[in-house]
Amino acid sequence: MFTLDTERKAIEGYAALNSVEHFEYDGLKGFVAFDLYCTDNPEFLVELIVAYLDKLNQIDAEWPPLPEVA
């Protein structure tokens, strides 16, 4: 469906433009927690990738909202 490179770029692209510094998931905090959340929740990751590809192709799209997971 999507390459690992595209997944990685979408995750890093989101984190570069949105604060994930205080995101907590599975006992972790920050980017590592966000990265793990994305890989553990494919439905969120797909939305993230689609938004990333839209933005890459200059289509006005919004990032999916970051869930409040603690």
Image (tube, helix red, strand yellow):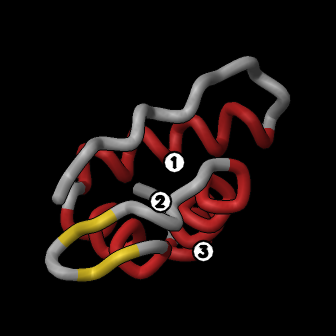
Q: Residue at x 66, y 42 (%)?
A: 53
Which residue matches tag 2?
Answer: 2
Vertically, is 20 above or below 3? above
Q: Amino acid at mark 1?
A: Ile
Q: Which mark is residue 39?
A: none
69 relative to 57 in the view: left or right: left
Q: Are marks 3 and 1 in contact (CB under 8 Å)?
A: no
The residue lying at 71 percent from left, 60 percent from top is 16
Label 1 sits on a secondary structure element that is helix
Q: Report, in whole angstroms, how far the alpha carbon at label 1 lies from the one at label 2.
A: 8 Å
Neighbourhood count class around disc 1 (C-alpha, 10 Å): few under 14, some 14–19, many 20 upward: many
Report the front residue among 40 and 23.
23
Q: Earlier in the sequence, mark 3 or mark 1?
A: 3
Q: Is residue 36 left or right of residue 31?
A: left
Q: Amino acid at mark 3?
A: Asp
**Residue, disc 3:** 5
As drawn, 42 above or below 51:
below
Quickly name the residue at label 1.
49
Q: Residues within 10 Å of mark 2 (few under 14, many from 20)?
A: few
**Where does residue 51 sit, x and y in percent of width and height?**
57, 35
Q: Quadrant of residue 8?
A: bottom right
Q: Residues within 10 Å of mark 3 (few under 14, many from 20)?
A: few
Going from the N terminus, do you reach mark 1 or mark 2 first?
A: 2
Q: Are marks 1 and 2 in contact (CB under 8 Å)?
A: yes
